[in-house]
């Protein structure tokens, strides 16, 4: 479709532009823009896992972080974690302190004297298993993916260790395994789920602060947890479709 | 068709042919079984061994202790939080001893006073003052704290 530049008039230009714009609108009507999921969200079929964390029940013992390290052979040092606990301390003068010594595996000590504290609480953190996960979208080789159950997983034999996903995760939930040189992250203990066991962190929690469940099943523990509590996700403005729901989340938490 | 376009098309055709051949040989067989990834990765990940076997397994052999624990306030504290992962021990208990944490510091991980720990969820004590110098287990049975 060569254009004869010599007698290409303004009228031609407007006509062609109009045609292109109209064509785009027409095509978008035929196939409207949809939300982009990293994998297709199953509707009403299969499992669609999510996690619930009740901040009011967390005692900061770090049993979850320790159990996770042992279960998944996460290197002890340098400090990499698939799940960890943070202690938030908001002081009377408005200053916010966040501490997580060794990810909380050895328990916590409050560094601030009690009379200076306005508010303090523990926040357990782990992979959010986002439905629109930024980390799986950036993988150049298809090693990071979302399973049909909605878990963000890594195919370690395919990973090239480029670290894009480590940077893309807004929650800091991925790391490069120093021994294997490939990315590692929380799998919600996929190997345990398939055997009918609870994920290690949820088994280890002495107060039941962590639960997981099937979001498609409206009677599952998690669905009821989300229904009965005022839950929030971390960084909702990033539109990651996070499936980690916190009860009693303070706005100071990032 | 001008000559240079013909040559270009030929070059494209050769490249595409090479790509198709490479794709045929290099794509793993379970690729795109569920999505743009190796479907076999799922079975590889789920095939890993579970290290924590959970309380029901321990109860098969240690039923008195398990029964004791179920009646006390430590009912929600899994055996393996204190004794470590039991997959080897459950298979061969004589050659794989589990750890037994007798020191104060261990209990204090959960029970030390900290304003961030909710008081109604866990009873907390002053780490230094509460019966200083004695092991917790001389007075509290770890499997049923008030025995």
Image: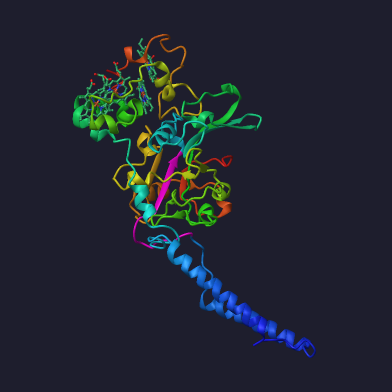
Q: Nearer the viewer, residue A58 or B79?
A: B79
* Residue drawn at 29 percent across, 45 percent down: A195
Q: Position of residue A140 (x, y in %)?
A: 54, 56
Whether residue B100 sits left or right of residue A55 in the image: it is left
Kindly give the residue lying farthest to the bottom in the view shown: A7
The quarter of the displayed image where residue A93 is located: top right
Q: Which color scheme did the rendering employ for the protein?
A: rainbow
Quadrant of the frame with the N terminus of chain A = bottom right
Residue in view at x 39 percent, y 61 percent: B34
Viewer-closest of A205 and B60? B60
Label the magenta part by its dominant secondary structure.
loop
Percent position of residue A187, x then y: 42, 46
Res A179 visible:
yes
Image-quadrant location for residue A27: bottom right
Could you tell me which quadrant the C terminus of chain A lies in?
top right
Viewer-proximal residue among A157 and A112 = A157
Q: Residue furthest top?
A: B133
Range covered by the magenta-colored residues: A38-54
On screen, residue B41 above or below B115: below
The residue shown at (42%, 32%) is A66
Task: State the image coordinates of residue A120 (x, y, percent, origin top left).
Answer: 54, 31
Front residue (pair A167, A112): A167
Can residue A215 be seen here? The reply is no
The residue lying at 38 percent from left, 55 percent from top is A149
Q: Is residue A57 magenta?
A: no
Judged from this view, the residue extending furthest toward the right is: A6
């Amino acid at each position: 479709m060569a254009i004869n530049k010599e007698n290409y008039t303004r009228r031609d230009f407007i006509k062609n532009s109009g045609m292109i714009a109209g064509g785009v609108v027409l095509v978008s009507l035929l196939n409207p823009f949809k939300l982009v999921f990293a994998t297709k969200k199953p509707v009403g079929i299969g499992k669609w896992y999510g996690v619930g964390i009740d901040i009011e029940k967390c005692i900061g013992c770090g049993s979850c972080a320790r159990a996770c390290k042992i279960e998944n052979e996460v290197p002890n040092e340098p400090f990499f974690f698939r799940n960890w606990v943070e202690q938030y301390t908001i002081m009377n003068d408005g200053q916010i302190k966040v501490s997580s010594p060794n990810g909380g595996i050895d328990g916590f000590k409050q560094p601030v004297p009690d009379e200076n504290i306005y508010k303090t609480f523990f926040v357990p953190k782990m992979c959010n298993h986002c439905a629109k996960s930024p980390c799986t979208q950036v993988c150049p080789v298809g090693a990071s993916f979302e399973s049909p159950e909605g878990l963000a997983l890594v195919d370690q034999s395919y990973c090239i260790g480029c670290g894009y996903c480590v940077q893309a995760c807004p929650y800091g939930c991925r790391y490069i395994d120093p021994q294997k040189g490939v990315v590692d992250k929380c799998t919600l203990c996929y190997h345990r789920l398939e055997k009918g066991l609870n994920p290690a962190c949820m088994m280890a929690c002495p107060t039941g602060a962590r639960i997981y469940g099937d979001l498609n099943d409206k009677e599952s523990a998690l669905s009821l947890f989300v229904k009965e509590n005022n839950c929030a996700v971390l960084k909702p403005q990033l539109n990651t479709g996070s499936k980690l729901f916190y009860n009693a989340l303070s706005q100071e938490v990032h | 068709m001008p000559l240079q376009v013909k040559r270009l098309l030929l070059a494209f055709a050769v490249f595409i042919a090479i790509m198709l051949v490479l794709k045929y040989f290099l794509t793993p067989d379970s690729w795109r079984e569920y999505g743009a990834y190796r479907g076999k990765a799922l079975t590889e990940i789920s095939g890993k061994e579970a290290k924590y076997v959970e309380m029901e397994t321990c109860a098969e052999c240690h039923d008195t202790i398990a029964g004791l624990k179920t009646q006390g306030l430590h009912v929600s504290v899994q055996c393996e939080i204190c004794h470590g992962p039991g997959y080897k021990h459950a298979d061969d208990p004589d050659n794989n001893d589990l750890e037994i944490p007798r020191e104060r510091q261990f209990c204090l991980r959960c029970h030390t006073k900290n304003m961030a720990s909710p008081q109604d969820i866990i009873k907390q004590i002053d780490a230094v003052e509460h019966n200083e110098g004695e092991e917790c287990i001389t007075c509290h049975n770890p499997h049923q704290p008030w025995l």
